[in-house]
Structures are given as structure tokens and as C-alpha cells.
Image (cartoon, rainbow, N blue to C red):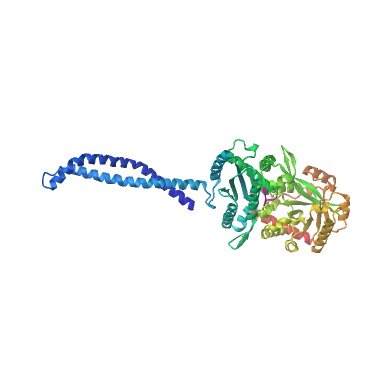
Amino acid sequence: MADLNITAKLRQQTSSIDAADRDIIALGIAAAAIIMFMGTGGAILPQVFRSIAGLGEAPDTTLINALLLNIALIMFGWRRYRQLQTEIAERRTAEERARVLSETDPLTGCLNRRGLNDETMRLLEECSETGDVVVTMMIDLDNFKQVNDFHGHSVGDEILQECARRIQAQMPANAIFSRLGGDEFACAFRSKPDRRDAIECIAIAIVEEVAEAVTTNKVMVNVSASVGVAQSDMRCVCAEGETGAQTLLHMADIAMYHAKKQGRNCHFWFEEPMEEELRFRNTIEAGIRQGIANGEFVPYYEKQIDLQTGELTGFEALARWNSPSMGLVSPDVFIPIAEEIGAIGELSESVIARALEDARDWDSSLTLAVNISPIQLRDPWFAQKLLKLLLKANFPTERLEVEITESCLHENIGVVRTIVTSLKNQGIRIVLDDFGTGYSSLGQLRTLPFDRIKIDRTFVSNLMDSQDARTIVEGIAMLGKGLGLPVTAEGIETSEILDKLRAYPDFNGQGYLYGRPKSARETNQSLETHGLLAKPAEAEPRLNTSNEPFDADAASQYASAEAARRRKAGNG
């Protein structure tokens, strides 16, 4: 609001300045009046003085009125001239104020992107004459969106102001410091070409200072920063056509992204190979967005086996990207990027929808397990979205297992508990995935209604070689038995590992020993061979085969019908 008021005042001042320009005509009139006064006054004033002294007749009344009019015009012109001088001074002040506003970030008081570009160009010109280099740092706060989501934007603004103060305090004298927008800052300063160690110290100090907890409104908030560093004597191929300042910022931005990829809360110098990596990432990003729209993301199915009987119990749906240009892409490549660009929800829902359609034709004894991203569990409407997919596919809720990773429990346990409870109430089974890697407490296992725990593949694959892995697997098996939770071991790749796991009761398993994940067509062919496809007569009628919008009442009716069916099955 303050910025809007300043802008309105500037516009008002500009309007008055335009009027002042027009008043130059009034000043011209006053000048003409002075000339006329000199002409008429020289003739009339002597007559007036002689008349007052009684030495002659009074001058003509018309001439006296003309003289008085000249005097009035002179006074009017002088007054407008003084106003004009004042308004010109105000115009200069307003122009300077407008320039400052156009180059300054209103929240932190430092330069904005435009101001940084101009000042960096000036610094580059100066350094070209002295032989110095210009160092640019790009600083981005890690996971800052969560601060705004959990604590509100007012707290977020205070964190930004404090971080700006801390970063600026580590800068050399006369450094250029800018907030580019959001939670992204940049700085530029002059340095000798061989002072890399000193620059390293500055980057390390920034990371350490930002990582110190900030207390505001009696709330302690922890943030961290990823820093990218570049200097003007480096070469950047992908920045052709950009100005020197833009190229420097571009290189620092690439290095900052690399720091985020390497774990955040650190700094990295720009290196040429990073360009190819960024170009590949941009290709992946564009491909993901286009691939979701084109239906290129499909489920592949990995078998889940009862280790005691060897019977097939179900499948886990694993996302694959069937890219027209890159072929079949592993989820290790596209899932992290989809999460970063905010596309994971839409991608996951499209894969789950197809998996539900495929699994509806399986034998009713087979379950379908789907993975949920931690980002999806931040969405309070996730349970309703999943119920919509079940309603559209007419898929029985008791055949669906939702796998959530252990790390999800530490982000926002309140929201996770609400979603898990809501899914559980609809008959969906909840599996705690990657157990043993996320430091879950026993209290969370007792309070959250899990139906199964899943041992992370790293422990299973090292079962034969590591005593620690054997101890952990045995401990999880005992814990599952004590809590009444069946266990699934993933990553079974050899018969020796299978023999070890068969010693534990109530264990399911999956892994390459039972075959690699297969497409829907290959999975259906295998099920048909073993007589595990539902017969047409057994197929239930679909409740909704149209593309009509989601009906909350219909979803509620579906949930009630499912609950009644489960109660009836239990009584039977």
C-alpha cells in the first residue's frame, strides 16, 4: 500500500510539473509586461508626480489603468516564476525518488534485479581498466515456501529481512547486494583474480550465518542457503548473446542449482560441465510437463509374494516415463525434478488412475500398492482426490495399499495423521515404506493406523554381507510381530536372501528374484496364464464411466457403500 501511495504522489507531482512547464507562458507575459511598464511608466509617472505636486494636469485615466495593469502582470509573473522554480526542484526530487524505487527492493531496502544489472555493468567496466575480476554470488534460501506455509507470510517477510541483513554483513565493502525476488538474493563485488580462497571464506560465512536459527514472534525458524559462485574470467557457452552482467548471474545461478542438487546448505563454484547438466534438466522439465498432458507416464508392476507359500499376493505400481525421444525413463531421473517443479501431484494421480483401471481386471485376491510423494501429503485434499480416482475406476478400497515413506512423518505430522486416518476410514490399507531410514519413533507407529511396514531395500540387499543389516532386519521383524503388523521386504535379488527371510513369519517380499517390473500388457498376459484375471461375469459394473466433474455426494455414497460391503464381508 505504501508503494501505491508513493506512486500516486509521483504521478500527482508529474502532473503539477507539466502545469509548471505550461506556466512558462505566464513568465513570458510578465516579461512583456515589464517592457511595457518601462515604456508607459517613463511617460506617465512624471506626469503623476507633477500632478501630485500641483505643477500640472493629471495623466489620462486609461494610461494610469494600463500602468496599474502592467504592475499587476509583473507581480503575477514573478509569483508564477517562483512557483515554477519550486516545482522544478520538486520534479528533480520526484525523478530521483522514482529512480530509487525502480532499482530498490521495498522489503529489504537492497537493490532489485534491475539495479543489480546496472551496477554490475558499471563494475565490469571499471574492472576492465584495472585488471580486476567481478565475483557474483547467487544465494537462494532452501525450502523457504514451507516457512510461509507453516508460519505465515508476515514471519516469512521478517526472515527475509534478517537473512538479507546477515548476508550483507558478510559482503566486502562497496559490494553490490540485491534481492532478485522471492527468497533469492545476489551480490557482486570486485576482487583480484587470484583471491579464490578469500571468496571461498565469504561463501562459507554466508551459508553458516543463514543457517543460524531466527527467532521472531516467539517462533524459532531454521532456514539454510544454497550459494552459487562465479567470476568474470570464467567461460560460459550457453550464455551467448547475454550481457556481461547477465552472463555472470547466469553462471552463478547454474552453480547455485548444483549446490541444491548436492544437498543444499552449501556453496559451489561454476564449472563448464554444469551447463550440460542444466540443459539436460531443462529438457527433462519441459518433457515432464508435456508428457503428463500426453499420457506418457505409465505404471509398471512389480510382483509381491508371500514368502512362506510362494503365492502372488499383489503388485506394486511403479511409475515409468515412456518418452518418445528418450525411451523408457527411470523414476530416479524424473521423480525428483517433478517434485521440484510442482508437477508430482498431477503426474502421480495420472499413474494411479491408470493403475486402478488395470488392476480392476485382476483377480479379487490381488492387491495394488501405490507410492505417494511426501509433497502430496502436504495437500489436505489428497484423500478426497484419491477417493475420486477410486470412484471413477470403481475399484474396491480394500484392495488398495498406499505406501508413504518414513520421512513424511517429520514434515507435518498433524496433516499426515489426518490424511492417513481419512484413507484408513475408507478401507484403504496404509503401508509405512522405507522403514529404518527415516528415524520414526515407536510412538508414531502406535498412533498412526499403519497396516504394514516395509523394510528398505538397502538392508535387504546387504543381508548376506552385513551383520548390521541382519540385526536391523531381525529387529524390524520382531517389532512387526509385537505390533501385529505384517512386513514386506523389498530388494530380494538372490535365493540366499530369500532363504534368510523365510525364517521370519508373516513376511511378504518383492525384488528382481521374482522378475523385473512389467508393463500392464505383460502383467495381464502373465496373470491370464495363471488364471488370475477376473472373469467377465465377476466384473462389477462401473459407477461412473463418464468424464463428468467429481461429485462429492456420489463419492460419499460410494464410501458408505464400500463400508457396508466390508461390514457384510466381515459378518460373512
Residue at image location 59% in from the left, 46% down from the top: 188
Apparent side of residue 287 relative to residue 521 in the rendered image (left or right): left
Apparent side of residue 73 relative to residue 419 in the rendered image (left or right): left
Apparent side of residue 83 relative to residue 314 in the rendered image (left or right): left
- Residue range in magenta is 263-267
Q: Residue 117 location, x and y as percent?
A: 55, 43
Q: Residue 236 location, x and y as percent?
A: 64, 38
Residue at image location 60% in from the left, 49% down from the top: 184
Q: Quadrant of residue 88?
A: top left
Q: Which of the image's four quarters has the C terminus?
A: bottom right
Residue sitting at the far top? 241
Closer-to-camera residue (386/220):
220
Q: State whether residue 193 is above or below residue 310.
A: above
Q: Residue 7 location, x and y as percent?
A: 46, 48
Q: Quadrant of residue 403?
A: bottom right
Q: Is residue 347 visible?
A: no
**Across the whole image, how many numbered discs are drawn on residues?**
0
Q: Is residue 161 visible?
A: yes
Judged by its main secondary structure, the magenta piece is: loop
Apparent side of residue 449 relative to residue 306 in the rendered image (left or right): left
**Is 265 part of what is drawn in magenta?**
yes
Closer-to-camera residue (137/492):
137
Closer-to-camera residue (103/425):
103
**Is 65 part of what is drawn in magenta?**
no
Q: Residue 463 location, x and y as percent?
A: 85, 54
